[in-house]
Image (tube, rainbow, N blue to C red):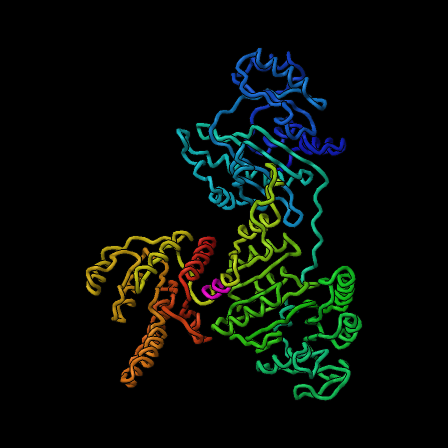
Amino acid sequence: MNQPNWVEQKINTAMAQKVTILSEKDAGDILNAYDIPMVSNNMAGNAQEAIAIAETMEFPLVLKGCGKEIAHKSELGLVKPGLFSSKAVQQAALDIFEKAPVQLEGVLIQPMIQGKREFVAGMFKDPHFGAVIVFGLGGIFTEALHDVVFRLAPLSHNDIITMVSEISGKKMLGPFRGEVAVDFKKIESTLMGLSRLATHCPEIQEVDINPLIATPTGDLVGVDALVKIGTPVQKINSRPPIDKKQLSKLFFPNSVAYIGASGTIGKWGNLLPSNTISGGYEGHIYMVNPGGGRILGKSVYRQLSDIKESVDLAVVTIPAARVVDLIPQLKEKGIKGMLLITSGFSETGKEGRLLEEKIVQAAARAGIIILGPNTMGICSPHKKFFCTSSHTHPMPGGTALVSQSGNLGVQLLNFADQHGLGMRAYSGSGNEGMVTVEDYMELFEIDEKTQTVVLYLESIKDGHRFFSAAARVSRKKPVIMLKGGRTEAGSRAAASHSGAMASDGVVFDAACRQAGIIQVKKPMEMVDAAVVFSSLPLPAGNRVGIVTLGGGWGVVTSDLCNENGLELADLPDNILEKLNALLPDYWSKSNPIDVVGEFDTNIPLVAMEALLEWEGCDAVIHLGIDGKRIFADKMLASVAQSDPDFDKKEMDSMKKALQEFDRDFNHRVKELVNQYQKPILGVSLMSDATSKMLQGTVEDRYKTVLFPSPERAVRALACMCEYSTRRR
């Protein structure tokens, strides 16, 4: 539906008169034109006209003062509800005209809409993301409960379904205290109408429909509307997109020049090339330092032009003030990529920001991509190219990581190396002077070897572009994000109007949910999600089977599943019969399956396979089955210390048997995952310094996953189920 001409004329007239708040009559007419169900408005210029109109309507009625720039009619005494006679209408009209602090256009006579349930709907313009649509509980509950959800316009049918499902008071949309369920088509018409209005009318900055009353018959009617207008919000200037092929070459260079190379251990000029060399990089490495000599066993070039061969990437660690003079040398040499490690730019204040802008502009004119500045480096395990401050070399894999915190990023790399999480690429994005997180998203979208995208973010440069890229990527591969500097949803919302309901954090969170990003709140949750997405098939649903060595863990894990939206279904008779033949009579006979500490190492595998064969189970968690070798090591060490007559040979035999059990068990688990294409997540009985969360080889599509605690396993599985549901 296109914008009606009269709507455009009405808005243009108001803008010319420098009006910022439309009258409620104009607001209602415009909203009705966009299929937003608003109460009928009849305007009267005086008390006698009000009586005449009222006598054509059914009582009870409501009278409201109507005029431009009136935002809070109730507080001004300009709303008179519950009028049951012409005399009451006359007195209300006289009172409104007398009390009005501004010149009124007249009074509105409206039918008094009856209903026990009140909602709010609205729209406001965010400088990063544009139009944001709001829905939730309304009336007096808006400020008290702040039960509202947000989505970016334009909305889809599915967006509206998820908005309705996310409000805590969604039960009020169903049958409620004798009133029938709210007509979903009316909800959809309201929210879709707001979405279209935001697109068609850029001058409308905010719409607030509160209350939106649900009638006993399930109808939905807006009885009060506020519409603010103004100069269209200008989109925040964003950086031009980076050529993705050229950006990709930064991660997979065939030759690297270290400009500012140093022979001093601990300096950046030494940390980075020594890491690259020790990581097995097979390309050409050139050291550049005016002092010449040898560094790390390689001859040093005094200047870049002395290198005769071509260079793909320059890694720069020289002082900030000298970087701008380096640009012409890079251009002359034909170097298209610069990894700018150096700090002292926009992170330091105004002067540093100006210097950064100067360098970025010079590089752009020269056709050079700058990654950074103020970054702790990049790595690409598939290329054996490790260029970070942390000397860690994770195995190749499908996880791409971008971190706006260098320290957090390299810690995650260390974890990946320690536990066998395969990496596709890593970048500490630094100040993002040229290459932004949006560029990384678009790169990983088209990179076939990237299976999972992991982000640590504190800010974004271009909300529209970030949202669009994330939405496209998440349709193909999981995007996991930890947001630094989060605010509590709605904590600063002090008023009931739509634009005041959201802090920046709330809008950002809503955009991420709408784009399909899996959001986590802790660094380890981000790591755990990356582990399962990289190593297990997606579950088809949220139904979980649990196999536990002891009852307590099963109870705790059941509670955790329930709290995270995972379902534990009742076991069918065929599984009960199979396990009755293997377990004592006192076993749990339910899900979780408690194997009551039985020593038969085959029982847990039988139980797990029975669950995997069952169509009512989408994923399996096993508890305390792995890790018996560590338990035994500690126990046998105590025996050896306390019993001078212990049989060492017997104890060594026990150790070997349990080591073989753990190895064979985990190998069989991996086989079951591949066979049934369902995820299996384990929680070890005990762990030690040698324990790894992932067991498998680079070639393995799926691996064995072992967590140290039930809550981490359940939360990781919940992330998988959330993503799987969104994709479906």
Q: Where residue 406 sits in the image (x, y, percent)?
A: 62, 67
Tell me, yes or no, whether the highlighted magenta stretch contains residue 715: no
Q: Where residue 142 sits in the image (x, y, percent)?
A: 54, 36
Near-viewer residue (659 or 29): 659
Above or below: residue 228 compared with residue 42? below
Range covered by the magenta-colored residues:
527-532
The residue lying at 73 percent from left, 67 percent from top is 344
Does residue 337 appear anywhere in the picture? Answer: no
Above or below: residue 250 compared with residue 173? below
Can you say which quadrant of the picture contains the N terminus?
A: top right
Does residue 386 appear anywhere in the picture? Answer: yes
The image quadrant that residue 347 belongs to is bottom right
Q: Where residue 376 sits in the image (x, y, percent)?
A: 64, 70
Above or below: residue 1 compared with residue 681? above
Q: Where residue 492 sits in the image (x, y, percent)?
A: 60, 44
Question: How many numbered marks appear?
Answer: 0
Above or below: residue 207 compared with residue 284? above
Magenta stretch, main secondary structure, is helix
The residue lying at 64 percent from left, 34 percent from top is 227
Near-viewer residue (245 or 60): 60
